Amino acid sequence: TFMQRWEQARVQSFQRKEAMADVQRTLERDMELLAVTGVEDKLQPNVRGTLEKLRHAGIRIWMLTGDKVETATCIAISSRLADRTQSLFRIVGVTSRTEASSRLARFRQIPNAVLIVDGSSLQVFLDHFPQEFIEAASKAPAAVASRCSPVQKAAITKLLMSYSGKQVAAIGDGGNDVNMIQEANVGIGIPGKEGKQASLAADFSISTFSQLCPLLLWHGRNSYKRSARLVLFVMHRGLIIAIIQMVYSAIFFYAAVSVYDSWILVGYATVFTMFPIFSLVLDEDVSTTIADTYPELYRELQKGRSLNMRQFLTMTFKSLYQGTIIMVFSVYILWDETYFSLMNLSAVSFSALVFTELLMIAFEINTWKWPMLVAELFSMCTYLVAILALPQVFDRSVIFTWQFFGRVFLVTVVSCVPVTIGKLLKRKFSPPAYSKLT
């Protein structure tokens, strides 16, 4: 019978494969082909458009997959990871250090080429030329690594962070992507047919690959810009009151006396200014549609202009100017017999300080929302309540007079107007990219 002949061929020690093939051919006789079946690994919806937007946003894309080279190449072409105008440079079957060095040198000479490397060749590069490989591959418009093991995926992610100095986001949908996701700066998981291991191990989870655009171009961009603005204003709030105290001590012969009562100092750090500053996290400079239509706006973030040394020095100068003006004007320009006492001097300068901070926040807002307005009104109302509730700090017979209001108004205007004019001139002669689209 067939099974007997098959067992005899399978246990042969000489020419076993040929014997098994001969036995198999005796079975496959007089057969008619009826159909051919196959498994189609379809791309998720809108993958091409998503990759196109990410490229316009200035994001370099690497595809690390366990598929064979031919399958990975077809996916790269069908998903438009490799553009039609870009050539494909394959490094496949490299086993020696010398061959790896020559192939890498050849790749460096070809501009605008997408790199495709298999797992065995990749391991040679990782063992002998990790830095050179990452530097060369990072200059390519895209890179594809096939037959990658989970360890190799994590190693590439770690090398990219080490040698390129860039932030790396790893996206995966299977259990073999967990190491890579956990190694990256940001891990993004997609629940797939293989399970939810990647989604559970990631920092963020999305249901489809196309949701990567809103995650990065909208939420990511807003998160960066809002965080940068929040940091700057928290610094401004603390620095300006420190400068006021410093100027006050310098004017009065460096006396170790606090210019403000402890109650209003606590109020300044909390209810008087906290809510308006934190309401800046709700601000939006562009709409969702514009951020999705013009992914080039995301490229501006890579320059780090929202939070850098220049922004730090600018905010420091604003705090220095405004803190000095508030105290100097309160002491020298507006001083008379009524405002000679520390209580009234403190009331004028502190009122100007609170209104200056609230106006600075208001001028920074691009799109007003009702929580922002509520935060501003709540801060002013709580300050009014503090004036009424703290008679040992505020002299109400002086505060509720037109002279007091005029002094506070003048000090606030002098401290805010030059800074605001400088900001408007900067917007006019060097407008941000988003202002051209709104």
Image: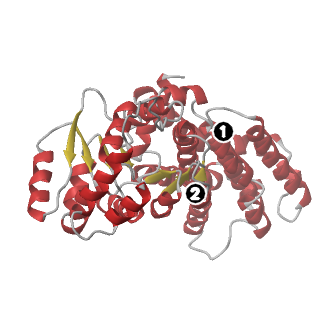
Report the Cα–Cα distance between label 1 and label 2: 33 Å
Q: Residue at x 37, y 59 (%)?
A: 6
Q: Please report the residue visible at 45 percent of the width from the left and 26 percent of the height from the top.
A: 428
20 relative to 368, above or below? below
Residue 122 visible within the image = no
Query: Which residue, given by chain and number where applicable, does mark 2 sit on?
Result: 203
N-terminal-most mark, 1 or 2: 2
On screen, 193 above or below 46?
below
- Quadrant of image for the C terminus: top right
Here the colouring is: secondary structure
- Looking at the rendered structure, the kind of residue marked 1 is Ala
The nearer-to-camera label among 1 and 2 is 2
Q: At which x and y percent is residue 418?
A: 52, 38
Instruction: Check the image and report above or below for 8 versus 106.
Output: below
Q: Amino acid at mark 2?
A: Asp
Q: Nearer the viewer, residue 223 or 141?
A: 141
- Residue 87 sits in quarter: top left
User: How would you rate the neighbour count of disc 1 (Cα within 10 Å): few for under 14, some for 14-19, many for 20 or more?
Assistant: some
Residue beneath disc 1? 362
